[in-house]
Amino acid sequence: MRRTLALVGLALVLALTACTGLPTSGYVNPGRGPQVDDAQAFAFVPDGPQDDASPAEIVEGFLRAGSGPADDWATAKLFLASGTQWDPRARVTIDRLADRRAAANADGTGVTVSLTTVAGVDANGAYAPTASGSAESLSFTLARVDDQWRITSAPDGVVLYEEVFPTVYQSASIAYFDPTWSFIVPDVRWFPRALVASRVATALVDGQPSAWLAGAVKSAFPDELSLVGRSVTLSSSGVAQVQLPRAALSLDRTTLDRMQTQLSKSLVTAGISEVQMTVEGTPVPASEVSVRVTRVDPSPAVVTTAGAFGSLTGDAVEPIGGLSAAIESLAPASIELEADRSLAAVRTQQGAVASALADGRTFLLDERSGLIAPTIDAEGEIWSVPSTSPTQLRVITAEGVPRNVGNAWPDASEISAMQISRDGTRVAAIVTVSGTREVWVAGIQREGGEVDLGVPHVLSFSQQGAFDLAWLDDTTIGVLADVDGASRLRELNVGGRGTEAAAPDGATTLAAGSTSVRVLDGTGRLYSRRGSSWTLVATDIRVLAAQQGTTS
């Protein structure tokens, strides 16, 4: 009976999840920053082993019990023979419900589980998709214990159906600083819901950035400083307390304030609004530092069909200082604005990359064949690359001094679009590998005068028809695609899952807004999306500019 109820409960959870917009295949809701997740209302209470269960049933029950992390997966451990070593925290394998199969050998002492994986989460909580249709086999050995089958050897980690995963695990962001200590850079991780606050604090204080971000971000927490205990406790006033060793008292106030900022920004994504560092129960004096925001100016920046460039306010285009005249003189096909609007990166209609400065000057930067739309980094330099030579990426000063970028998009044969995040630490691109378009993101590493990309992290192994992208916020990349003649907007979470929805017909350009997504179509119509609805904003627009945030 308990087993029947558990299966009914699983069906109910999946049905409710589907009702809130989480499909059973393809892209799934990633959210935009901290949100209330309907899945939080549910918790799995898996069954333990049933009497006289077959070896395959024991393994199947053990895998289902991975959905119950309570008491360190106590229910799952009931399926193990005494003394069997198994680490449930080592990894999460996320697979498809319809494809999982368990088959026992003739004498029942071995069971092989075949599954199709869609993603995985490592021991640090880092999420990574797998290539479409990836097959995996897991091997288990069993023995009879008190006349019942029990597992004597099991692969470390848990296996969860993709529909179940967001109910058991929750996303949260580990907050790091950019190299200038000006921006907060989120490193999205996934942890069991009941343990999320403690896992976030441990990951920040004792851990390291995700491998692809290493070298691109900084942490104020010294390497030698460790969390005391492995939990976040609540004081009588409801303040979350993070216990640090006495060595923290020797740190200077600037470092402590940055540590406080990282903790507060990290734990707020786990639902904790107030955080206090303590040493032996005594609060450490520290306060959050001011950080720059990454929002975009609420007014779109456009070029009209008449050739005028500026900020679109209502039906009027207001010129931007001396920048508008400089941009207009270049006959732009694409534009990206620096945050303070003192500089623009332009691809001309002739295919060259140029810079336009607010003092009216322009510089021709790159005349190589087949250049894609350029992007601007946090140093005010412009990145340019030919579509058929991704490794030939260059960073060029506004006045034309070039440098090559090391480790640029290895193994990619083509690059279709590229943009740097508004905090300046990451660059995203649509690349082609072995004939398939993928979306990659890489950390930007600077040392001395050298610029390199970190090891690329794949956000999606298959992006059919993708041709443009934009950072929509600090954790979400929008990807514009044409699929069988229909425009689609995909939103990929940097460190998680994604959504897909229709975009206006004939969409050609994607850009972020302050609280919206903007799309320009091939007939000059500019649309803005808030929520799920697209609204026509303007007509007779020739170019929609990307914007690198604001100066606040």
Image (cartoon, grey):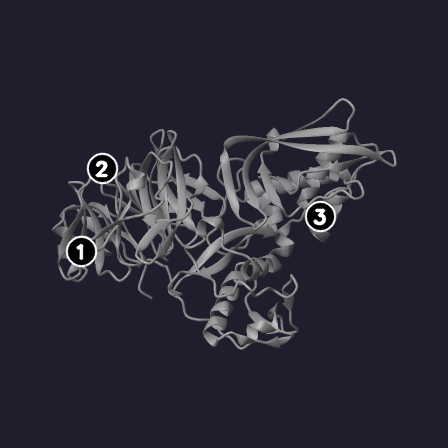
Is 550 displayed left or right of 105 in the figure?
Answer: left
Disc 2 from disc 1: Cα separation: 21 Å
Residue wearing tag 2 = 370
Q: Which residue is drawn at 37% across and 58% down?
A: 423
Residue wearing tag 3 = 73
Q: Position of residue 94 (x, y in %)?
A: 58, 39
First in residue order: circle 3 vs circle 1:
3
Q: In this view, does 440 lie above or below 397?
A: above
Mark 2 closeness class: few <14, some 14–19, many ≥20 residues within 10 Å: few
Between 72 and 457, the residue placed more toward the observer is 457
First in residue order: circle 2 vs circle 3:
3
Between 510 and 339, the residue placed more toward the observer is 339
Q: What residue type is labelled 3?
A: Trp
Q: Which amino acid does label 2 sit on?
A: Gly
Disc 2 from disc 3: Cα separation: 54 Å
Is residue 15 something that shows in the picture? no
Circles 2 and 1 in contact, beta carbons < 8 Å: no
Residue wearing tag 1 = 399
Mark 1 closeness class: few <14, some 14–19, many ≥20 residues within 10 Å: some
Which type of secondary structure does the marked residue at label 3 adopt?
helix
Spot the residue most to the top.
106
Q: Nearer the viewer, mark 3 or mark 1?
A: 1
Which type of secondary structure does the marked residue at label 2 adopt?
loop
Q: Where is residue 253 in the image (x, y as percent from the top left)?
A: 48, 76
Mark 3 closeness class: few <14, some 14–19, many ≥20 residues within 10 Å: some
Q: Which residue is drawn at 23% across and 40% down?
A: 371
First in residue order: circle 2 vs circle 1:
2
Disc 3 from disc 1: Cα separation: 59 Å
**Among the 4 quarters of the image, the one containing residue 349:** top left
**Among the 4 quarters of the image, the one containing residue 500:** top left
Is 452 displayed left or right of 20 in the figure?
Answer: left
